[in-house]
Amino acid sequence: MAKFIKPTIFSSKCLGFAACRWNGEIIPDRFIASLKAHVSFVTECPEYRIGLGIPRDPRRIVLEGESYSLQQLNTGKDVTKSMEKFSKDFIASTGDIDGFILKDRSPSCGLKDVKVYSSLKPGSPTGKTTGFFAREVLEKFGHLAIETEARLTNFNLRENFLTRIFLSAKFRKIKAQPTIKDLVQFHAENKLLLMAYNQKELKIMGQIVANFEKKKIEAVIADYQDHLYKALAGLPKYSSNINVMMHALGYFSERLSSEEKGFFLNTLEEYRREQTPLSVPLSLLRSYIVRFKEGYLMQQTFFEPYPVEFLAVRDSGKGRVIFLRKSGHNGERMVS
Ligand code: SF4
């Protein structure tokens, strides 16, 4: 049904690309390996690039007063300035990119659960923070999909990551040679997907595309991009995804047998209870769309937001992240 543009993703180099960890190891990652056929990777090891060598003395983030520093544990060498400089320069020179996969808990690459100590002396961590390289990533690319390999073992986060990187790649292509016609097409085919993410932003984006003020295409694209990233900032609520799927079911419910409808509604209930990923009811809907040749639904990316090769479910869905659902809102928290 869908044609995909290859996204460009940054990955920490130790995640299956090079044996560059402090202890000289490489970390094989099944999901990242599966991405290689569909994604262009940019990889780097910030610690190696600032000259720490392989293997190397482990590093630690130390908080003294209000100041964080990156120090080597045994030598006491302070590499804060060189890491900050490398990170700033590298991120500033990074061109078009659609997302990041960073190594969990690394004092350089870790996203938000990196241990902080009060000194280099033996003792327990006093808190958690973001790694030095990851800070720069968040500073410049905070609007993109940024995950760690550990969080991506959770299928909800993985589905969201894949959806965002393939959408971002497609939008980048439109931005490269922008026309209103292509933007209208992009908006039309992503309508149900964006409806699931954020109805308010979808409405604003519809007005931007209509361009009643007759703005120049560059201004329209810039406005649209702002709201596109706002729309994608949070995970879609379960209830929003279910509403979109029930809406789609309406297109062929008359033509399905009561057993087929019952089976679909059971699958939807399993999804609502977080016992099955979104991709399962989506696969069912896709089969109906093909069977009944529903042209409007066929063009909707909601049903195939990324290549079908990623639809296989290989985990329990719980990973190391659990979801807290309060009053219909999906929050999330890390469990270590
Ligand atoms: S986590 Fe980052 S700095 Fe550490 S080995 Fe991997 S790529 Fe290098």
Image: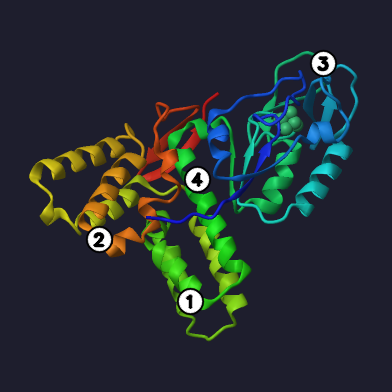
SS label for mark 3: loop
Mark pair 4, 3: CA separation: 42 Å
Q: Name the residue under label 3.
A: 121
Mark pair 1, 3: CA separation: 62 Å
Q: Are marks 1 and 3 in contact (CB under 8 Å)?
A: no
Mark pair 3, 2: CA separation: 66 Å
Describe residue 214's horizontal placement relative to residue 308 as left or right: right
Pointer 3 or 2: first along the chain: 3
Rendering coords of residue 308 (x, y %): 41, 43
Q: Name the residue under label 2.
A: 294
SS label for mark 2: loop
Q: Mark 1 points at which residue?
A: 181
Mark pair 2, 1: CA separation: 23 Å
Q: Please state the quadrant of the image where ligand 1 appears.
A: top right
Q: Are marks 4 and 1 in contact (CB under 8 Å)?
A: no
Identity, as a three-letter code, of the amino acid under mark 1 = Lys
SS label for mark 1: helix
Pointer 4 or 3: first along the chain: 3
**Who's the residue at 52% across and 62% down the image?**
228
- Number of the label disc, if any, that sits on residue 162: 4
Q: Which of 301 and 102 is in front in this view?
A: 301
Rendering coords of residue 174 (x, y %): 56, 67
